[in-house]
Amino acid sequence: MVKKFIDEESGKVIERSVMNSITIDCVIFGFDKGSLKVLLVKHADGISKGEWALPGGWIREEESIDNAANRLLKELTGLDNIYLEQLKAFGEPDRFPLGRVITIGYYALVKIEDYNIKAGFTASEAKWYKINDIPELIYDHNIILNFSLKHLRNRVKQAPIGFNLLPEKFTLLQLMQLYEEILGVEMDKSNFRRKILRMKLLQDLNEKQKDVSHRAAKLYRFDYDIYKKLTQKGFNFEF
Amino acid sequence: MVKKFIDEESGKVIERSVMNSITIDCVIFGFDKGSLKVLLVKHADGISKGEWALPGGWIREEESIDNAANRLLKELTGLDNIYLEQLKAFGEPDRFPLGRVITIGYYALVKIEDYNIKAGFTASEAKWYKINDIPELIYDHNIILNFSLKHLRNRVKQAPIGFNLLPEKFTLLQLMQLYEEILGVEMDKSNFRRKILRMKLLQDLNEKQKDVSHRAAKLYRFDYDIYKKLTQKGFNFEF
DNA sequence: TCAAAAGTGTTGCGGATACACCCATGT
DNA sequence: ACATGGGTGTATCCGCAACACTTTTGA
């Protein structure tokens, strides 16, 4: 990726491999059938044709990097208004074989069934992979993925973000299984209930599950307004 | 910052404001006389001449961004082997007035008295500012600084990094005052002792303070080896 | 009536908090 | 003697973990 420049002072044409190219790569997490999954895409052409990768793209000149990440996500999943946070920049000099490209990693949490409905995907192939079943990815994408997983495991204990992976209405057991899966631990049903309910972050919807072959459980919803109010009063989500 | 390019396909000269320039900016924390401080530099020339800023610089083509940050820090403070971690990338399109420049924020924790001894500083002016006394900085540097402060306050509770701000040998009260200053809280002497000693991360040096006008306190040292061992066994620093 | 998951109750332990108190040392 | 910080001891409270138990519902 050698570009030709005109040197401002001398007026001469100089060749320089392009330093400072920037991309964005997204780790998109979903939760489905008790498993934490990541959305990967198969490259349709270019030097890494046929290989799996994190979805990503270029930053446009007029948009902020957060906006670029949101736009890419919308293009990739058809979903708007997704939980999205920057991880950090990855910039080993040799991470991209054809030149110096720094990438900014993002991670997103989506409700997988929303994605299935809208399915705005146009790329050649995209697939949800279980977290324990990730194939080899191009460039340093495995490193980025592992970093984001570690980050998610920390974050989920510090802030109530896990809800973004669940449907709007969920049962306490679903929530517990989400935590068990992400953190890789087993939990006690009874203690989990007490702990999460004591925080008063969940709104009891006075609704029950339907079409289950056992006693139907109450449905709850995460109440973001209450969380904001509590946070302002100094409340700190900790799990 | 408009640059002239030669378009690869058409061969024509095109002007384009440079997209994707990348810099590094460092928030260097120090702890001195009971106050948390940040090292700021005064710009000697350029469009922001005379204004205060976070120390920073450019990434070289052949170095990783982590190495670039380490090199810059060495150039700025004369110090090697410093605690240094990436924050994240900052990339609002208008953050830099003369073109699109994305910056990668880093934060560093240094022992301020080491800095005073070596003092490898060549820039026009550099000064330690108390955290509550930060002037207006150029570009989005106040945003970066505030972000790093918030990050530090979280991090210091999750990992034993505060020690990097203290001298090699310190007393328990010094450590407590460090935590009090960073977190902005008051703590109980007795409870702090128990809590920190129970973790067994501190090595009792069997030495005492000298030249103090009161009963001399025991000196301790943070034992990184023990910490590593404990971490491998599943220990999790939490404060 | 049995399986499966929902949901409640109880008990013991350990860490956090809030104090009260004594110790050593320089001025 | 007293100011200053160093250092210890103790009572209380509360959350957490472990575990036993009852309830509801479909098959």
Image (tube, coloured by chain):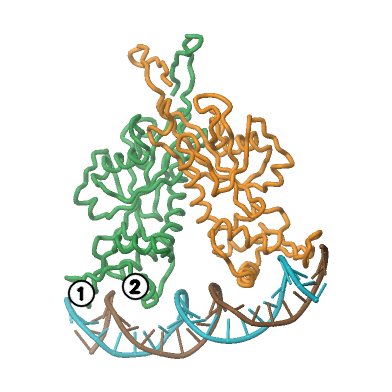
Chain colours: A orange, B green, C cyan, D brown
Going by the numbered disc 2, the residue's amino acid type is Leu
Q: What is the x, y in percent for residue B12?
A: 48, 9
Looking at the rendered image, the disc whose residue lies closer to the viewer, 1 or 2, is 2
Instruction: Name the element at disc 1.
Output: loop
Give residue C8's quadrant in the image. Answer: bottom right
Residue B113 position, x and y percent, is 23, 55
Q: Quadrant of residue A44?
A: top right
Q: Quadrant of the N terminus of chain B?
A: top left
- Disc 1 designates what residue? B213
* Residue A97 x %, y %: 42, 28
> Which amino acid type is shown beneath numbered disc 1?
Ser
Pointer 2: what residue? B197
Chain ID at mark 2:
B
Q: Nearer the viewer, residue B167 or B238?
A: B238
CA distance separating discs 1 and 2: 25 Å
Q: Residue at x 47, y 31 (%)?
A: A22
Residue in view at x 49 percent, y 25 percent: A47
Which of marks 2 and 1 precedes in the sequence?
2
Residue drawn at (23%, 39%), measured in percent from left and top? B122
